[in-house]
Amino acid sequence: MTAAEQGGRRSRILVVEPYYGGSHRQFLDGLRSHLPAEWLFLTLPARKWKMRMQLAAPWVVAELAKLPVEKRWFDTLLVSTFVDCAVLRALLSTLPGWNPRTLICLYFHENQFAYPSRSADPGLFQFTAVNFNSALAADRLAFNSEFNRRTFLDGVASLLNKATDIALPDLCARLAAKSTLLYPGIELAAIETPKRGFVANRQHYLRLLGMGTVVVSTALHEFYGIAVIEAVRAGCRPLLPNRLSYPELFPHQYLYKEGELAARLEDHCRAPRALSRERALALTERFSWQSLAGGYRRWLGLSAG
């Protein structure tokens, strides 16, 4: 039982998201809806990501300083990788009223080691360093896919190998030990029954999904795959590359190897077959908030079991 539960009160969770839009916003809104806690969100619009990573930490402390001292106590701090967690932790230690035992949880929607760049910009190294130092400073790490987790740890190992005169042999193992895999939950109830692009609103988008029979990806970059999972839930048969996060999300029969896509898509178009409702549910239910909420409760320290 957590200290908050022992005291007969809900846990207080501070969420810091300097890039509050898209999948980041969808994730946090779902988390707040499915986990009982007292939440405070400190957010900024989803733009200028480089500036966010550099300046979010002092901005957070300035915002908290506006609160009464007694309101600065939290059981858990949840941040994304657009926050320099190491700088934030150092600055918070000087803030009157801050709980020094706050559990700091860092969620990786992506990692800068594996994020593709349009140009060979040597300045981008600073952002991989932010991710690395943030992971060191946080108490707990969670990744939205095993692909994301593996590429981050591989990136750290590559970074450390370059420092030939600095020996940190156990660092990767320590980071791995405090990391876990937690898929971001998805609200799937609205698309549970199949009905037999850019659109004005989400409701129209979901109706279109229900009319489809196949969802195709040719992605060269993907840390998770929310849009694909939503389409599969609507009954679209997945046809996905055998790379990135897809092999951990769907069985081998729905993956294509290099050079196979055209033939397999042609076969489907000759005899299109949507997934049955039962198969769509079986493939996607483990990604729903109902299935994942318990794991997040434990990761965020909201329960002992």
Image (spheres, grey):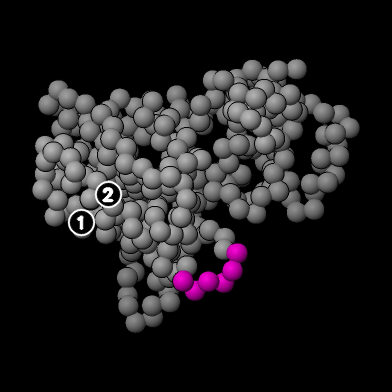
Label 2, label 1: how far apart the Cα atoms are: 9 Å
What's the magenta bit mostly, secondary-structure-wise? loop
Q: Tell me the element at label 2.
A: helix
Q: Residue at x 40, y 36 (%)?
A: 28
The single residue placed furthest to the bottom in the displayed view is: 165
Q: Earlier in the sequence, mark 2 or mark 1?
A: 2
Q: Residue at x 18, y 46 (%)?
A: 65
Provide the residue designation for mark 2.
60
From what the image shows, is residue 45 above or below residue 150? Answer: above
Q: Amino acid at mark 2?
A: Val
Numbered disc in front, either 2 or 1:
2
Left or right: 75 as drawn, with respect to 281:
left
Q: Residues within 10 Å of mark 1 (few under 14, many from 20)?
A: some
The single residue placed furthest to the right in the displayed view is: 270
Q: Tell me the element at label 1.
A: helix
**Residue segment shown in magenta:** 118-123
In percent of width and height, residue 112 lies at 47, 59
Provide the residue designation for mark 1.
91
Please say if the residues under marks 2 and 1 sit with CB atoms less than 8 Å apart: yes
In percent of width and height, residue 279 lies at 65, 24
Q: Is residue 121 found inside the magenta-colored segment of the image?
A: yes
Q: Residue at x 61, y 44 (%)?
A: 246
In the foreground, 156 or 56: 56
From what the image shows, is residue 114 above or below residue 97? Answer: below
Q: Residue at x 36, y 42 (%)?
A: 43
From what the image shows, is residue 273 above or below residue 196? Answer: below
Left or right: 185 as drawn, with respect to 282:
left
Q: Is residue 269 found inside the magenta-colored segment of the image?
A: no
In percent of width and height, residue 237 lies at 72, 31
Q: For residue 293, say whether it is visible.
A: yes
Q: Residues within 10 Å of mark 2 (few under 14, many from 20)?
A: some
